[in-house]
Image (spheres, rainbow, N blue to C red):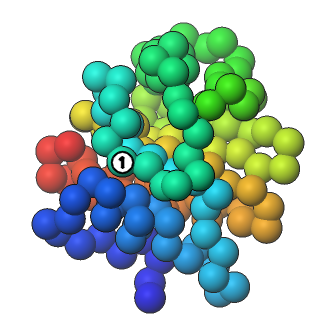
Amino acid sequence: RATGCISVSMSWQEYVDNNLQCPVDAEGSTLKASALVGLENSVWAKSADFPDMSTDEMDVIKAIFDGTNPGSFTIGGLKYMALGSEDPETKMRGKCAGGGCSISKTGKTLVIGIWATPVLASACNKVVEALAEYLVSVDY
């Protein structure tokens, strides 16, 4: 099965299960956790291991996309160092001990992937950004 396969007519949970949590490498490794979080601060769908996020955590992430640079942010209480990206208005990376995260902002949602070794950051970025690009193409 190809990485980042997008299918139409899925529920939000199916997007997480079938796209963000699909194997990202030849060994069959998957992201540690992933979620779709609405810009209105509600979790649309998440993997079983995705930590509970507070609205404050969601607001800090959205503020980073709007140009505020606090240097770090948290997801479920775990602190990530904010890293730049090639498109800081729609793509963000975070690094923590043993892993990190990739977050892409669409018109209506944050697509969040959390990785841990042996998964590579680039593999996480690829699946998160592929789903975000698809959601943008269908006005989400």
- Identified at 50% across, 66% down, the residue is 21
Q: Is residue 65 visible?
A: yes
Image quadrant assignment for residue 111: top left
Above or below — where is 9 with respect to 90? below
Q: Nearer the viewer, residue 64 or 53?
A: 53
Q: Position of residue 103 (x, y in %)?
A: 51, 41
Q: Position of residue 117 (x, y in %)?
A: 79, 61
The quadrant of the rendering that contains the N terminus is: bottom left
Q: Is residue 41 left or right of residue 48?
A: left
Badge 1 amino acid:
Ala
Q: Position of residue 107 (x, y in %)?
A: 25, 34
Q: Is residue 76 left or right of residue 65?
A: right
Q: Position of residue 78 (x, y in %)?
A: 72, 31
Above or below — where is 48 with respect to 5? above
- Identified at 29% across, 22% down, the residue is 40
Q: Residues within 10 Å of mark 1 (few under 14, many from 20)?
A: some
- Identified at 22% across, 59% down, the residue is 11
Residue that badge 1 annotates: 45
The quadrant of the rendering that contains the C terminus is: top left
Q: How many marks?
A: 1
Q: Is residue 86 visible?
A: no
Tag 1 secondary structure: strand
Image quadrant assignment for residue 105: top left
Q: Nearer the viewer, residue 3 or 36?
A: 36
